[in-house]
């Protein structure tokens, strides 16, 4: 089976239970190039479980996830190595993605303004700077689909605004972005708001930007 | 094709080389595993202190025992035999602790690297190589410090060094296995310290009158201890016993790396 025409990420009837506790119960979502999607849910609603299944780090019990193109995943808690510097992280992930240059990495470091910490070990960085590094690692290879789990936790206001500049740039280049959050402050920014409740995703708002949105 | 043709044809720009996975992983694994300040402090301070303390407790009385590997009855300086046990014990704790801490704390990071496209086999090979380098370095240091307490002669010292190296490799691999298996730091440290103490001191006939019992053959330090004592006291190279120690190291390493492979795997969703 191939993804529906025009979608880069297609989630169908995904189920996941931990023992008797059913977390996802037929969740479904379609995301197209350039779309910005928020998956919103209360604490414990299964948001991170869904994102881990989409990222491939957790197996679903049932259902299908189809991805077209490359994927970038930014976990909620920064997954970095405290003994390595920012620059070493960039080189490590450049090797993971088999990149030939760090041009994109340098751009992101510049955009998020943490170049002065390039030679500092991750263990000595502030929470906000660790989160910037966490985000940069997910974006290093300029993925077609970006999954972000509570990405702006720990950002100050200026960094929060810069984060949206980065998102705007990605969307302008037809990259799809799925943000998982327990709280949406600025709903207008999103094309789709999908509520995760009782293990299912329900579209709450689909803005006029794309009236043909389905789930 | 003439020379002119060759010069006139526009040349394709050379494709820049991608960041290579093995050298990068090897360099950073080595850096990560050697950045443990507590392990470094243990190495510098604990090794000489432990030698000094153990020798002071034991004294230099003659001790007669039967070397299990050859059946030969030997009378040796009990202080010298205890120095071998103390050295073996030091490397079990320092290498086991350093590798366990480094592996356990970076498991999620390694999973992220694999998820981003790192080949698991490459990461595994890099980790195995860096463990071997660190274990060998710690064993060499421990054997060199021993010279301040006992000049055993070149052949004897080489046998002790080889025994220390195999012991360090074994506990490095044990640290790797615990690092991917155990959830908490405390459980891992406890298993390494208690395992290393029991393993090495049960092999010493001074501390354990039953050191010649067959059951001790099944302990990881049996092979290295027999090789070191056989080499230094009866001037024999018991290669089979050194290989037995390496087999323990290989068994721990393979088990740990298989579990590492399972715990870092990711699923790819492709249309």
Image (cartoon, coloured by chain):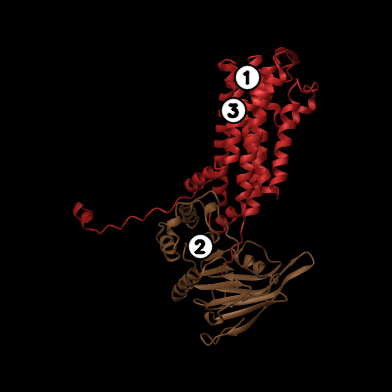
Left or right: A125, with A51 as reference point = left
Question: Circle 3 marks a residue in which chain?
Answer: B
State whether discs 2 and 1 lie on one chain. Answer: no
Viewer-nearest of discs 2 and 1: 2
Of the pair B118 and A73, the residue shown nearer to us: A73
Q: Identify the element where label 1 is drawn.
A: loop
Left or right: A205, with B8 as reference point = right
Q: Identify the element where label 3 is drawn.
A: helix
Task: Read off the residue under disc 2.
Answer: A132
Left or right: A138, with A110 as reference point = right
Q: Residue at x 53, y 82 (%)?
A: A188
Give the number of the disc on residue B142. Answer: 3
Q: Residue furthest left?
A: B4
Give the number of the disc on residue A123. Answer: none
**C-alpha span from label 2 to label 3:** 42 Å
Task: Read off the residue under disc 1.
Answer: B237
> Which chain shows up in red?
B
N-terminal of the pair, mark 1 or mark 3, is 3
């Amino acid at each position: 089976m191939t993804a529906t025409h025009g979608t880069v990420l297609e989630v169908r009837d995904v189920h996941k239970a931990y023992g008797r506790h059913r977390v996802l119960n037929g969740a479904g979502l379609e995301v197209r190039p350039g779309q910005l999607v928020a998956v919103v849910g209360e604490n414990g609603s299964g948001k991170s479980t869904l994102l881990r299944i989409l990222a491939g780090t957790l197996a679903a019990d049932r259902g299908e996830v189809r991805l077209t193109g490359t994927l970038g995943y930014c976990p909620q808690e920064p997954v970095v190595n405290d003994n390595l510097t920012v620059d070493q992280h960039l080189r490590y992930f450049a090797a993971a993605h088999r990149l030939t240059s760090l041009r994109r990495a340098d751009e992101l470091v510049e955009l998020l303004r943490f170049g002065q910490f390039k030679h500092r070990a991750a263990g000595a960085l502030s929470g906000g700077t660790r989160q910037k590094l966490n985000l940069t690692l997910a974006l290093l290879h300029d993925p077609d689909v970006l999954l972000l789990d509570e990405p702006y936790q720990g950002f100050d206001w200026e960094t929060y605004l810069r984060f949206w500049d980065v998102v705007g740039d990605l969307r302008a280049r037809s990259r799809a972005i799925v943000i998982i959050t327990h709280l949406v402050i600025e709903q207008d920014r999103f094309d789709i708001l999908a509520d995760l409740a009782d293990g299912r995703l329900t579209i709450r708002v689909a803005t006029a930007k794309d009236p043909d949105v389905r789930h | 094709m003439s020379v002119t043709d060759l010069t006139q044809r526009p040349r394709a720009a050379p494709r820049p080389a991608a960041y290579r996975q093995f050298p990068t992983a090897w360099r950073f694994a080595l850096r990560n595993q050697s950045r443990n300040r507590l392990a470094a402090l243990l190495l510098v301070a604990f090794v000489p202190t432990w030698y000094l303390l153990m020798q002071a407790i034991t004294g230099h009385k003659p001790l007669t025992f039967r070397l299990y590997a050859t059946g030969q009855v030997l009378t040796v300086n009990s202080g010298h035999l205890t120095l071998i046990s103390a050295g073996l014990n030091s490397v079990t704790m320092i290498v086991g602790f350093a590798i366990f801490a480094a592996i356990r704390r970076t498991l999620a990071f390694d999973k992220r690297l694999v998820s981003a496209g790192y080949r698991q086999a490459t990461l595994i090979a890099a980790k195995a190589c860096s463990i071997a380098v660190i274990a060998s370095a710690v064993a060499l240091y421990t054997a060199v410090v021993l010279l301040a307490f006992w000049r055993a002669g070149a052949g004897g010292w080489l046998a002790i060094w080889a025994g220390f190296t195999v012991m360090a490799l074994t506990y490095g691999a044990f640290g790797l296995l615990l690092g991917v298996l155990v959830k908490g730091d405390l459980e891992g440290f406890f298993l390494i310290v208690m395992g290393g103490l029991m393993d090495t001191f049960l092999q010493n006939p001074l501390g354990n009158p039953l050191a010649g019992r067959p059951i001790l053959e099944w302990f990881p330090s049996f092979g290295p201890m027999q090789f070191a004592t056989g080499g230094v006291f009866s001037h024999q190279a018991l290669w089979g016993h050194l290989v037995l120690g390496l087999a323990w190291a290989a068994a721990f390493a393979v088990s740990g790396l298989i579990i590492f492979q399972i715990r870092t795997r990711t699923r790819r969703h492709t249309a």
